Image (tube, rainbow, N blue to C red):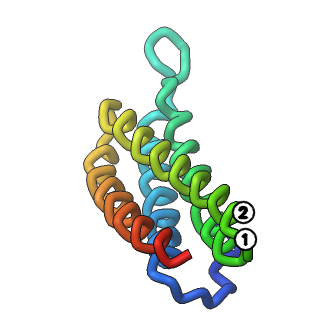
Amino acid sequence: MIPNFTNNLHGSPIYKKALEIFHLSRSISHYMATDLSPLQGNGNEDPNIYFTGDIIQQSVSLAPEILKAESKTFSEEKYKHTISINRLTNGLYKNCERLERVNSNGKDFLYLLRNEIKKFKDLQKNWMLTL
């Protein structure tokens, strides 16, 4: 399911990067989920499959938080959303690191996602100064 923030013609670079991260994480998650979905030898599911859903949840929340921060008039309200963006970004990065340790061919693509997250963090630093 594609979130409805593509209808907004928002042009900030950080917003566009958040959308790129969402699309990339969704693709990687779907690819890895097929490798992690079969049951293990003992009949249990692979606990790492939950991290594939976590990266989607965290990345889908980035763009709305950016819009919320930009729409607020008081700096205290903006600050709450920037903290949330920072928390989401750090969690997304950590979940990528966790997924790199699993037995899946998709883990090779996590390097791309982590690089995009690093670029996002750089954009985030500059963006926060403009709020």
Mark 1 Cα shell of 10 Å, populated few (<14), some (14-19), many (≥20): few
Which mark identifies residue 77? 2
In this view, which residue lies farthest toward the top?
A: 42
In the image, what residue occupies the spot 60% across and 69% down? 66
In the image, residue 79 above or below residue 2: above
Quarter of the figure with residue 68: bottom right
Image quarter in which the N terminus is found? bottom right
Relative placement, left or right, of 90 versus 106 is: right
Q: Is residue 95 left or right of residue 74?
A: left
Q: Secondary structure at mark 1?
A: loop
In the rendered view, tell whether residue 24 sits above or below residue 5.
above
State if disc 2 and disc 1 touch (CB < 8 Å).
Answer: yes
- Judge by depth and name the residue closer to the eye, 80 or 6: 80
Quadrant of the image occupied by residue 13? bottom left
From the top left corner, tell me how far across and down residue 23 is, in percent.
Answer: 49, 66
Label 1 – label 2 distance at C-alpha = 6 Å
| Residue 63: percent from left, percent from top | 60, 68
Disc ID at residue 46 = none
The amino acid marked with disc number 1 is: Phe
The kind of residue tagged 2 is: Glu
- Residue situated in front as seen by the camera: 67 or 61: 67
Residue drawn at (31%, 31%) of the image = 101
Q: Element type at marker 2?
A: helix
Q: Residues within 10 Å of mark 2 (few under 14, many from 20)?
A: some
For image coordinates 38% across by 33% down, the residue present is 98
Residue most toward the front? 75
The residue shown at (72%, 63%) is: 77
Residue 123 appears in the picture as rendered: yes
Would residue 1 be visible to someone looking at this image?
Answer: no
Q: Which residue is mark 1?
A: 74
Image location of residue 71, percent across then percent down: 71, 77
